[in-house]
Image: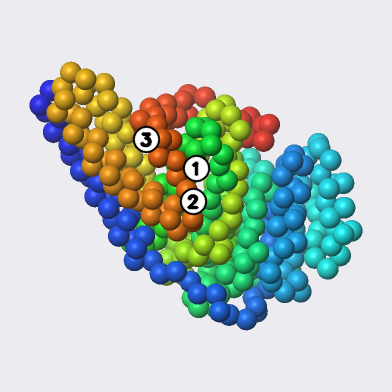
Amino acid sequence: MVFVFYIFVLIICLYTILILLFVIGFDRLNSTTDNHVDTTQFSVIIPFRNEAENLPNLLNSIKNIAYAKSLFEIILVNDESTDNYLEIINQFCTRNPTINLKTVENCRQSNSPKKDAINTAISITKYNWIVATDADCILPKTWLSSINACICENNPNMLVAPVSFISDSSFLQQFQGIDFLSMQGATIGGFGIQKPFMANGANLVYKKEVFLQLNGFKDNDFIASGDDVFLLENFVAHDSSKVIFLKAPKALVTTYPTKNWYELIQQRKRWAAKATHFKNNFAKSIGALVFFANCVIGVTLFVGLFRPIFLTLLFPKFLIDSLLIFKTANLYKNKINILSFLKTVLFYPFFTVYIAVISVISPFIWKGRHFNK
């Protein structure tokens, strides 16, 4: 038992060092200013499937974008929707004729509907800068102006931009919000230590010319998801100095958590499934370390009832996780319910291990479609 305790100590120490590095990287990364004239032209791509419930909020946020209407186009890509999406979009276009918005049908060519949708849109885009987001998102009015400022200041090939959840007071949504803050914190921290390994397709910006030069999703279109992370890996391999994180709250896109535990499990199974295909060894190492650290905490919560010394392992992980999560919440101006946070800390290790195991033995469902790992 002593040997096991020391192994556990080693794992928690390594995990604590990793998150501490992310905290350091988080503070090291500078924020972007926004005092630039609107000059960059954007093609905004939004794939969707049966999003009639969310389209009105998305379209309303598009209407309110404070950026020269002549400098951006919106391309909505319908992926076999069966709801009344067309009526909603047509009404919006009628009421807002100055917004350059078009709807096209997805051209399916691979095992990844979303990647096909992005490829379909890119083939008809007018501009070199692609901005990808999702139909269940709400875009801030300063979104494109903030992206434009970062492009003017840094001349990148890709921008990974911030995303946050809109959560109610239920534990399900609070849990997702807190977990997502931890992922966003790790994303920012990774860029801060010059080890980018995560991105989110709900707010991703890149040059079309580089996308085409790298053959887009050609080497990973057999994987259903990963339109963000695998593209990040390719852009980093091409020129890591030109891939940056846009640390600007004014570019923060908000989206909604899943509505029930079943949907959450399917989402996390999808995320876990793509992790086995990562090329980035740093990302693979992080995944393994996070998994084992959560295994340790899960076991500790039981063994600690009989061997109290094991409970000491809880504190370093709790403290370092809290530091990164609250830093991210402060940046995004999110409020964290302390009781929900404590519940999440206790529940998260078991949930993570469960997802890691079940993702190996069962397929996942995404937008009503079944996909194998």
Q: Residue furthest left?
A: 2
Please identify the quarter of the rendering in which residue 11 is found: top left
Q: CA distance from mark 1 to mark 3?
A: 13 Å
In this view, the residue in front, 51 or 47, is 51
Local crowd at mark 3 within 10 Å, few (<14), some, or many (≥20)? few
Kind of residue sitting beneath label 2: Asn
Question: Quick check: can you spot residue 106?
Answer: no
Residue at 38%, 50% (x, y): give it: 326
Task: Give the label on residue 159, or none.
Answer: none
Label 2 residue SS: loop
Mark before the other along the chain sequence, 2 or 1: 1
Q: Is residue 308 left or right of residue 164?
A: left
Kind of residue sitting beneath label 1: Gly
Q: Indicate the colouring scheme.
A: rainbow
Q: Are marks 2 and 1 in contact (CB under 8 Å)?
A: yes
Residue at 56%, 63% (x, y): give it: 251
Where is residue 226 drawn, in percent x and y? 54, 46
Please identify the quarter of the rendering in which residue 99 is found: bottom right
Q: Nearer the viewer, mark 1 or mark 3?
A: 3
Q: Is residue 153 left or right of residue 133?
A: left
Q: Nearer the viewer, mark 2 or mark 1?
A: 2
Q: Is residue 231 above or below residue 288?
A: below
Q: Which residue is mark 2?
A: 334
Q: Which residue is mark 1?
A: 177
Local crowd at mark 1 within 10 Å, few (<14), some, or many (≥20)? many
Residue at 52%, 62% (x, y): give it: 249
